[in-house]
Amino acid sequence: MPLLDLDKIIIKRTILGIRCTNCGGNLVMTQKGSMTGRFIKLISLGTIKPKHFECENCKKKHLLL
Ligand SMILES: [Zn+2]
């Protein structure tokens, strides 16, 4: 399935393209929610699902909308 492979590459590229705004380090996705994330989800009535990332280097938390 070539289409499936392409999807995987695009997803990987997107994640790798996100850098920490503080130190430029790698961001890893985290399952831990934040108050801000829950609030955005609530006021958007679930249409926006924020993704949480944490910097591997400085542990700064990032929210991707
Ligand atoms: Zn960082």
Image (tube, helix red, strand yellow):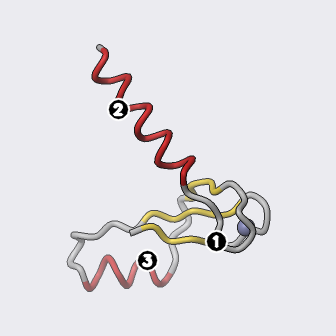
SS at circle 1: loop
Q: Name which of mark 2 and mark 1 comes first in the sequence.
A: 2
Point 53% across, 59% down: residue: 31
Is 55 on the left-hand or right-hand side of 12? right
SS at circle 2: helix
Q: Which residue is mark 2?
A: 7
Image quarter of the C terminus: bottom left
SS at circle 3: helix
- Mark 1 is on which residue type? Thr
Say if 16 sits above or below 32 in the image.
above
Q: Which mark is residue 37?
A: 3
Where is residue 8? Give x, y as percent.
Answer: 41, 31
Separation (CA) of disc 2 from disc 3: 26 Å
Say if disc 1 is inside 8 Å of ligand 1: yes
Is 37 on the left-hand or right-hand side of 29? left
Mark 2 vs mark 1, foreground winner is 1
Image quarter of the N terminus: top left
Separation (CA) of disc 2 from disc 1: 26 Å
Q: Name which of mark 2 and mark 3 comes first in the sequence.
A: 2
- Mark 2 is on which residue type? Asp
